[in-house]
Image (cartoon, rainbow, N blue to C red):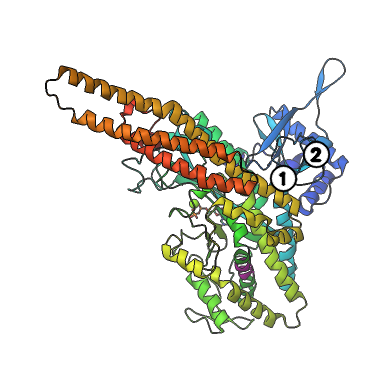
């Protein structure tokens, strides 16, 4: 039994360590930088760096690295040792304030979406004091933001920090209007629920598709999938339990609040949820979590699949981004509250979110767009590509009553100061959970369920913070000059809900009726990534991000290019992997089995004593018919892959991949999957679905 409290954060240079190890003045100056973003003086940085280095060396650390989040979706690090020549052939261990605060990695090989010519290789990493440094693999990790020599943003952290800042600014304006003088900051929080699959490492290594693309490109339906629903919340197998225990310990050491773990719906699928923290730290922690999931799995002879749809016909994996905003005094602004007065403030924040989500639904949609997630959204296992909000009956009825100018009748009601009837307290969980909604209000937070399991949560949170900041800015602009605050507030809540209520939907998001209804409401339904991404560089998006100083037009363009090219690259890698597997594994297997059958057939003919040959004949004729189709489909995929190379412009290229490569892959897969059901098991070159899904015993 481990002592969890002493284990927790033991590899983190957190507040308590800082207080213990830093001179009081230095500690105060650093805290001020952390909470207010004031610049850090070099002499302060020098003291902090030395304290950090001494602490790290005591723990066996030899190197430090600036740790950043380029546009690759994973994190990047470049390690330098602390050694410095002492002049006498010996070394001393050194770490300066400058090295702590700023790094200059060669940025030329990171995606920049045309932002930076590769001869301007220099990039800067800048210490993010709001996320603690930590120790991993004998290195001191310093969370940093990453930008180009000319100052353009090349990472996911910088816009996230900026989006938190604009949300803080605009939300504070609103709080002032309500007479709140205690709060000095508004912070956005996220709790990402992470789904993943585990498969036996040896089987994983036998599947080039899993190794190269993260998902199975072939695989006939297994006799038993998830029909019995016997995996969800089932008891943990000993091997899984051992894996999860080690994972949790590693996460706890790094100060990640790993809290909940359980079996998910599909066989071999699991979930991990941490306790929520600031959107910035939650993003860093989620990146660490994804990395550790893979590393710890490896140590247990397992492979962790973070792909959104590793197995066709089986539920894929998502990442539910639970999001809320709260003051530094601990009051959650999405908490309905106990008093009518707070209810009015709550209702204003609520309609701010409703307005933001409706107005910028395309931006929210594109934060969940990727080649992998395209397989998951709308497949009746995850929300469709249509953004809507679940509010639950009670909140919806309250807002509808406000809109209609009638009293809210259902329950004990009281008159709110702004002249509308509401509940004195909205009980949490008054309605059943709606698991089909992409964006559900769940008591005091919103749960955004569209993002894929492999995503960085920076994207969704940048958008959420910024679009809600925009609503709040509009509200503040309108209310700050108001002569009659209460009346204007009531009108604002009412008008906002009336204009944007089309985005509220409490029903079944998986149903066909909703798709039709959403079309009548003129809500977007951008089904694939190439359709979803262009909104990023649309005029509305540029105006929004520029006015909130989150991303410039150039930076948006670069991100768009990177994301769109990422889609095409994923499709092409899948296509080439498929070609390779078919040519070098599937075809030889099909030939070998046909050879067995033909040999037997011929021998029977030779002996010629009237042996029955129906079975061999049946198999041979079916397999050979399919082999003919296989060759044709393979040819079509190869042609599409070749033609894709000639397409110019990221959008055209991506559209071509979607329409030609993905569809050719689909045709090829159907044939291979049918062959799998005919060819003898010992000839089939890769483990089948049944084996993969039940690989952990
Ligand atoms: P579910 O029942 O939806 O599967 P989980 O317990 O798995 O719920 O995950 C819920 C997540 O929401 C956790 O990460 C939790 O910390 C987070 N969460 C709870 N309250 C808030 C909040 N106010 N803001 C952001 N996230 C929150
Ligand atoms: Mg959960």
Asked if residue 102 is positioned above or below residue 344 in the image, the reply reads above
- Which element is circle 1 on? helix
| Residue 151 - label | none
Magenta highlight: main SS: helix
Q: Which residue is mark 1?
A: 15
From this viewpoint, which residue is outermost toward the top?
A: 89
603 on left or right of 419: left
Is disc 2's CB within 8 Å of ligand 1? no
Q: Residues within 10 Å of mark 2 (few under 14, many from 20)?
A: some
| Residue 102 - label | 2
Is tag 2's residue or tag 1's residue first in the polypeptide sequence? 1
Q: Is residue 351 magenta?
A: yes
Q: Residue at x 15, y 27 (%)?
A: 612
Q: Which residues are magenta?
A: 349-355
Asked if residue 238 is positioned above or below residue 554 in the image, the reply reads above
Q: Is residue 558 magenta?
A: no
- Quarter where residue 24 is shown: top right
Pick the front one: 56 or 623:
623
Q: Residue at x 22, y 20 (%)?
A: 602
């Amino acid at each position: 039994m481990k002592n969890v409290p002493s284990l927790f954060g033991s590899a983190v240079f957190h507040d308590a360590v800082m207080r213990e190890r830093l001179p009081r003045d230095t500690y105060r100056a650093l805290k001020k930088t952390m909470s207010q973003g004031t610049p850090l003086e070099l002499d302060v940085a020098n003291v902090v760096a030395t304290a950090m280095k001494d602490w790290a060396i005591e723990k066996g650390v030899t190197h430090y690295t600036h740790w950043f989040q380029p546009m690759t979706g994973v994190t990047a690090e470049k390690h330098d040792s602390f050694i410095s020549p002492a002049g006498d052939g010996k070394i001393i261990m050194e770490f300066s304030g400058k090295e702590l605060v700023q790094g200059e990695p060669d940025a030329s090989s990171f995606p920049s979406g045309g932002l930076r010519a590769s001869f301007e290789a220099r990039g800067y990493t800048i210490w993010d004091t709001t996320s603690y440094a930590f120790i991993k693999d004998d290195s001191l990790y310093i969370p940093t933001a990453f930008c180009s020599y000319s100052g353009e943003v090349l990472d996911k952290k910088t816009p996230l920090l900026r989006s938190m800042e604009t949300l803080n600014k605009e939300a504070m304006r609103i709080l002032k209007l309500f007479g709140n003088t205690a709060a000095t900051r508004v912070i956005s929080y996220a709790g990402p629920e992470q789904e993943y699959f585990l498969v036996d490492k040896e089987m994983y290594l036998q599947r080039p598709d899993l190794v190269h693309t993260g998902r199975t490109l072939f695989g006939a339906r297994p006799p038993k999938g998830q029909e019995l629903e016997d995996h969800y919340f089932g008891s943990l197998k000993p091997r899984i339990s051992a894996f999860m225990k080690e994972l949790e310990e590693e996460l706890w050491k790094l100060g990640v609040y790993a809290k909940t773990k359980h079996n998910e719906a599909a066989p071999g699928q699991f979930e991990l949820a941490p306790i929520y923290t600031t959107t910035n730290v939650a993003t860093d922690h989620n990146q660490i979590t994804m990395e550790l999931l893979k590393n710890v799995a490896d140590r247990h002879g397992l492979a962790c699949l973070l792909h959104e749809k590793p197995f066709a016909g089986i539920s894929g994996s998502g990442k539910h981004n639970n999001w809320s905003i709260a003051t530094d005094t601990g009051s959650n602004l999405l908490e309905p509250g106990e008093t009518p007065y707070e209810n009015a403030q709550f209702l204003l924040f609520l309609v701010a979110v409703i307005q933001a989500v409706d107005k910028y639904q395309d931006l929210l949609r594109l934060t969940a767009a990727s080649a992998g997630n395209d397989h998951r959204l709308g497949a009746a296992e995850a929300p469709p590509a249509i953004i809507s909000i679940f509010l639950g009956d009670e909140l919806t009825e309250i807002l509808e009553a406000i809109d209609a100018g009638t009293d809210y009748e259902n329950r004990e009601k009281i008159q709110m100061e702004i002249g509308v009837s509401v509940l004195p307290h909205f009980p949490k969980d008054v309605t059943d959970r709606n698991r089909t909604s992409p964006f559900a209000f769940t008591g005091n937070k919103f749960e955004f369920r569209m993002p894929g399991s492999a995503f960085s949560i920076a994207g969704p949170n940048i958008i959420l913070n910024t679009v809600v900041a925009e609503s709040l800015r509009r509200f503040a602009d309108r209310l700050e000059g108001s002569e009659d605050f209460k009346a204007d507030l009531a009108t604002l809540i009412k008008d906002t809900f009336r204009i944007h209520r089309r985005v509220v939907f409490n029903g079944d998001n998986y149903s066909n009726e909703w798709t039709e209804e959403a079309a009548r409401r003129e809500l977007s339904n951008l089904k694939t990534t190439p359709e979803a991404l262009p909104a990023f560089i649309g005029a509305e998006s540029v105006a929004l991000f520029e006015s909130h100083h989150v991303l410039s037009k150039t930076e948006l363009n670069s991100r768009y290019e990177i994301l769109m090219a990422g889609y095409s690259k994923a499709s092409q890698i899948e296509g080439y992997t498929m070609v390779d597997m078919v040519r070098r594994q599937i075809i030889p297997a099909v030939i070998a089995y046909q050879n067995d059958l033909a040999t037997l057939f011929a021998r029977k003919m030779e002996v010629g004593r009237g042996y029955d040959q129906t079975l061999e004949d049946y198999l041979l004729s079916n397999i050979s018919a399919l082999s003919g189709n296989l060759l044709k489909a393979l040819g079509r995929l190869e042609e599409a892959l070749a033609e894709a190379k000639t397409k110019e412009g990221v959008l055209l290229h991506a559209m071509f991949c979607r329409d030609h490569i993905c569809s050719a892959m689909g045709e090829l897969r159907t044939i291979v999957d049918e062959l799998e059901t005919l060819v003898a098991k010992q000839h089939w070159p890769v483990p089948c679905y049944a084996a993969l899904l039940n690989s952990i015993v």
